[in-house]
Image: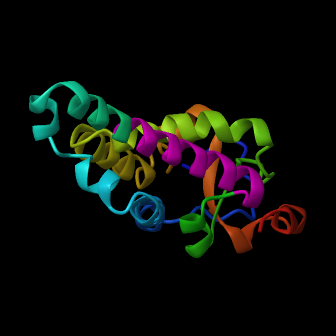
Amino acid sequence: PAPRGLAPSVTLKPYQKQSLAFMLAVVLISIVLRFVTGGQLTMNLLNIEMLREGGRYTATFFMNWFVFAAAFYLYFKYTGQTIGRSLGQRGFRIAIVHANGTVLEQHHWGPRAVGKMIYIIPFIGWLYFGLRDTYSAGSTEAEYRTAVDRKHHTVAAVDWSLPSETRLRLR
């Protein structure tokens, strides 16, 4: 079944495209961070040897993760507030809207960005939470929504199927 209150004209986006849009966003964030840090940050994110070296290497390891998480959060929060979706979602013509087809207000994007941070946890975030939500997004029992969508009462819809007043507010 479709989510309760879903506008009749709204078409939900296939879960494969939602997953690909998220992966594209992570790649974009990583490319920018790689360019800004000369490749050091992305190279050392999974470098466990830094933890064994102690002292400033351990601090650098955690600082790298802090910078990566902060960039991830800021990207999803501010692309959501300015264009109503991430660049990956825009590329796949996905719009994140309320079930009735209206655009999310600005205060929704910060909590959504925090909810998405669970996916960047190494291995557990990718293999458990990522696969769980990919399955949910294609499941009728979960109303074709991820955990983030259910928590924030949103749906991932095809942008051209939305009411015209909603489409005009998306970029």
Question: Residue 117 location, x and y as percent?
Answer: 45, 39
Q: Quadrant of residue 63?
A: top left
Q: What residue occupies the far right of the structure in this picture?
A: 165
Q: Residue at x 41, y 57 (%)?
A: 37
At which x and y percent is residue 14?
48, 65
**Residue 50: image location, x then y, percent:** 16, 37
Q: Main structural element of the magenta stretch: helix, strand or loop?
A: helix
The number of discs equals 0
Eyeballing the image, is 47 above or below 14?
above
Q: Quadrant of the C terminus?
A: bottom right
Q: Which residue occupies the extreme front position in the image?
A: 56
Q: Nearer the viewer, residue 107 or 153?
A: 107
Instruction: Looking at the picture, tell me which residue is in the foreground, 108 or 3.
Output: 108
Q: Residue at x 34, y 50 (%)?
A: 135
- Viewer-closest of 160 and 40: 40
Q: How is the image coloured?
A: rainbow
Q: Is residue 84 left or right of residue 134?
A: right
Residue 76: in magenta span: yes
The relative height of residue 112 versus residue 11 in the rendered view (above or below) is: above
User: Where does the magenta region start and end?
Assistant: 65-84
Q: Nearer the viewer, residue 103 or 49?
A: 49
Q: Is residue 142 left or right of residue 165?
A: left
